[in-house]
Image (tube, rainbow, N blue to C red):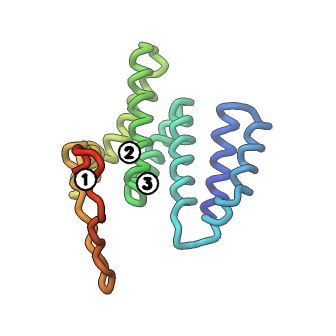
Amino acid sequence: FWGAAAAGLLFLVARRVADEAVAVIAGLLYAFWLSSVVWSSYSVLRDSLVWALILGAVWLVLRVVDGSTLAAVGLFFVLVSLRWIRPYAAVFVFMGLALSGLLALRARSRAARRPALLLAASVLACEASFFFTGYPTVAQMMGVYLPGRIILKERVPLEGERPERPPLLGPSLPANA
């Protein structure tokens, strides 16, 4: 089901960005791509749902740019769903929206102000809903992955597994010691 929804949303996005022929080709390629068929048929994987949500977010952003206020409300629900299912995918959508918003502000276009404010409101409302319910925000999630904060632990042998023996020869360079 979600794979078919993603193919339909890809068709809508491609038709809005390009033309009808490109949209048909893009939708058919996604619908019959082997991994899309496998992901859609295997109920445990949520990848087809994630693609449907990402493409839904793109389509709703395009609808907001076209002037639909109701699409901003839909975008809020899509972003909340995406944050709930795959937080890292939502982070990439947020970063894309932030970059687009900054470029729109840089252009100083009056036509871009309203869509930029609606999109910002959707993103901020999504973040506020997660913040006030105790879930980490995008800023907090990105802070976890700072190079100085990553802790690598040594691999612990599994039960019944022999621990690794030290190598017979020492490191070839002093820096590898």
Indicate left or right for 152 with 102 as reference.
left
Q: CA distance from mark 1 to mark 3?
A: 14 Å
Between 13 and 147, the one nearer to me in the picture: 147
The quadrant of the image that shows the N terminus is bottom right
Amino acid carrying label 1: it is: Pro
Q: CA distance from mark 2 to mark 3?
A: 9 Å
Seen at 50% across and 42% down, the residue is 71
Q: Position of residue 153 (x, y in %)?
A: 23, 61
Q: Earlier in the sequence, mark 1 or mark 3?
A: 3
Between 137 and 148, the one nearer to me in the picture: 148
Residue corresponding to mark 1? 136
- Residue 162 in view here: yes
Element marked by disc 2:
helix
Q: Earlier in the sequence, mark 2 or mark 3?
A: 3
Q: Quadrant of residue 160?
A: bottom left
Dots 1, 3 in contact, CB < 8 A = no
Amino acid carrying label 3: it is: Leu
Q: Would you place residue 157 above or below residue 160 in this image?
A: above
Seen at 35% across and 37% down, the residue is 121
Q: CA distance from mark 2 to mark 1?
A: 12 Å
Q: Mark number for residue 82?
A: 3
Q: Position of residue 159 (x, y in %)?
A: 30, 84
Residue corresponding to mark 2? 91
How packed mark 1 is, by other alpha carbons closer than 10 Å (few <14, some 14-19, many 20 or more), is: some
Q: Position of residue 114 (x, y in %)?
A: 43, 26
How packed mark 2 is, by other alpha carbons closer than 10 Å (few <14, some 14-19, many 20 or more), is: some
Between 35 and 101, the one nearer to me in the picture: 35
Dots 2, 3 in contact, CB < 8 A = no
Q: Position of residue 27 (x, y in %)?
A: 72, 48
